[in-house]
Every structure is written in C-alpha cells, then in structure tokens.
Amino acid sequence: MEEDILKIFAQSVTRYFETIADGGAALGTPYLGSDSESVGLGFSAVIGITGSYRGNIYYTAPREKLHALLPHLGETTPDDHLCAELVGEITNTISGNAREHLGGSFMISTPFILEGGPLAVHTAKNTACYVLPVSWKQHPSRVLISIQKSVDAP
C-alpha cells in the first residue's frame, strides 16, 4: 500500500475529530497488522472498497469512547444502539473523506456493524492490513486499512 494512502486516511481521521469534537485526536504510528492479532475494541464497522481500489476499511472503538463522543452529536443518553450507529458513521465519514482525495472511482459500501470482540479482520486477498491507532481524550480506537489499487485501474 502506498504511504500516500495512509496519509490520506490519517488526515481523514483528524478531520473527523476536528469537525465533530473540536480536535484532540492523536494518531499513533501505523503498523502492519497480523492475522493473529485481536483488534476489536467493542464496536466495529467495516466498509468494502471497490472500483479503482479494492479491499476494506474498519473502524473499531470501545463503548466508553463512543459514549464520550455522542454528546458532541447532541445525544444526551448514550446506549449501545447509538454506539453501533456512531461507529458506522465514523467509518463512513473517514472513507468518504478519503474518497475526496482518491476520486469518484473509489467506491465505498454501506458500513457493516460488528459488536463485541475479538474481531477477526478479513482482508482482501494478497492485501496487507495497516493499523492506525487513534487516541481521543485518552480513549483508544483503531482504523484498519486493507486496500490496494485494482489490477484494471489506470
């Protein structure tokens, strides 16, 4: 995966937290994930990528982080249903922001929500998975990026 792609997703995460929660997101050093690593943090969403790239994007966060974010969106009574919706919204927004840089042929699916852990990440065939740690108000989360340029892409 190109380093530029990781930078695009890092900027997308930062942009999300600047817009929704007045900033404060600290990004850790991206690293190559492994199949045996447990990455689920409670609530996760995955978006499939097709078109000029193929693969998937995950966002995973613990309940406590999502509960802390929900008041920034006007939700005063956090619950698991709202946590599931929020993790999907975050994944969709991060992927959508990346699409602005990668072009209209970077097609994203509707988020698929997963609750609980550990989470088994299913990457695209022959595609590495990079993990981008994200901390906000000392709450951890992760963005998992497993995409590659499509064979038939220009």
Image (spheres, rainbow, N blue to C red):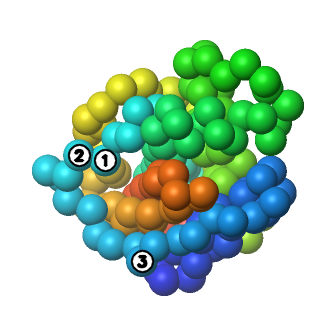
Badges 1 and 2: C-beta atoms under 8 Å apart?
yes
**Mark 1 burial class by Cα count in 10 Å: few <14, some 14-19, many 20+:** many
- Residue 22 location, x and y as percent? 81, 60
Residue type at numbered disc 3: Thr
Give the camera-side residue of 60 and 95.
60
In the picture of the structure, the residue carrying the numbered disc 3 is 29
Badge 2 marks a residue whose secondary structure is: loop
View extreme (left): residue: 36
In the picture of the structure, the residue carrying the numbered disc 2 is 38
User: Upstream in the sequence, badge 3 or badge 1?
Assistant: 3
Badges 3 and 1: C-beta atoms under 8 Å apart?
no
- In three-dimensional space, the C-alpha distance between marks 1 and 2, rounded to whole angstroms, equals 4 Å
User: Upstream in the sequence, badge 3 or badge 2?
Assistant: 3
| Vertical side of 103 occupied by 78: above or below | above
**Mark 2 burial class by Cα count in 10 Å: few <14, some 14-19, many 20+:** few
| Vertical side of 147 occupied by 90: above or below | above
Question: Residue 132 sits in which quadrant?
Answer: bottom left
Relative to 92, is 133 on the left or the right? left
Q: Residue at x 73, y 57 (%)?
A: 16
In the picture of the structure, the residue carrying the numbered disc 1 is 39
Residue type at numbered disc 1: Val
- Residue 108 location, x and y as percent? 63, 45
Badge 3 marks a residue whose secondary structure is: loop
Which image quarter holds the N terminus?
Answer: bottom left
